[in-house]
Amino acid sequence: MSQTVIIDTGCANLSSVRFAFERLGADVTVSDNPAIIRAATRVLLPGVGSAPAAMQSIREKNLVNVIQQLTQPVLGICLGMQLMGNYSTERGEKDQDTECLGLIPTPVRQLNTRDLPTPHMGWNQLTLAQHDGQPHPLFAGITPGDFVYFVHSFCAPVSEYSIAFCEYGEPFSAAIAHHNFMGVQFHPEKSAAVGSKILQNFLTMTQENLTGGAA
């Protein structure tokens, strides 16, 4: 049975993400059980709050290795995307950078909003990266310039792993990917029809048919 598992990181409000998938007819389970996560057709890594708190919760649940070893499509949303990087400059109790999951080789740092309000909150437009003349499969059917909803103060810089871009004070990665791991900085569950289409694209991905991602 095709099943989407949302990882219960212990520090995220999961209701809006779960309802967004259920509105699309998805079979959704929220779990921190390693066996259930490993058996999923696809996995969602949500995130609300701070990187230090989220990583501490993931470590306490003994899920770091579980997540790192997943081979099915995995999508991180907002902080969940940031946790996919190597580290975040968001500092914890020891005033040190936060070591993250290392799924996508990128740092995460504070967004330089210049003279714009912080955090970056509201609707902004996407620029889609092209690989072999096509956008990443996560953005199939999405038009460059479509608007999505952001709430964040940290970002992944533009890199070879960027599959979509945005600008707020500076250019940054609106989405990143590496092999089966994908992340979006925006909230698709709050991004109306465009967000629903992105989530629907994710629901079509399986370990067998996943074709996208920067190498």
Image (tube, rainbow, N blue to C red):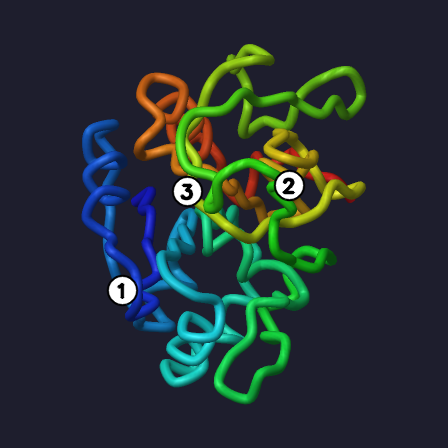
x 24%, y 55%: residue:
13
Label 2 or label 3, whichever comes before in sequence order: 2
Looking at marks 1 and 3 on the same chain, the residue that comes earlier in the sequence is marked by 1
Secondary structure at badge 1 equals strand
The reply, left or right, for residue 41 in relation to residue 86 is left
Q: x%, y% of residue 43?
A: 42, 52
What residue is shown with label 2? Answer: 114
Q: Nearer the viewer, mark 1 or mark 3?
A: 3
> Residue at label 1?
31
Disc number for residue 41: none
The numbered disc on residue 151 is 3
If you read the primary sequence from the N terminus, does the residue marked by circle 2 or circle 1 appear first? 1
Residue 149 percent across, percent down from the top left = 40, 30
For the point 32% across and 54% down, which residue is it? 6
Where 190 sits versus 58, above or below? above
Residue 50 location, x and y as percent? Answer: 43, 66
Q: Nearer the viewer, residue 158 or 33?
A: 158
- Check the image and report above or below for 51 versus 168: below
In this rendered view, identify the residue nearer to me: 128 or 35.
128
User: What secondary structure is found at the residue carrying circle 3?
Assistant: strand
Q: CA distance from mark 2 to mark 1?
A: 39 Å
**What residue is shown at x 42% (from left), y 55% (from top)?**
45
In the image, what residue type sits under mark 3?
Answer: Val
Give the quadrant of residue 69.
Answer: bottom right
Quadrant in the picture for the N terminus: top left
Please name the residue shown 80% across and 41% down the image.
160
Q: CA distance from mark 2 to mark 3?
A: 16 Å
Q: Is residue 101 among what the camera can see?
A: yes
Residue type indicated by callout 2: Arg
Query: Percent x, y for residue 152?
Result: 47, 47
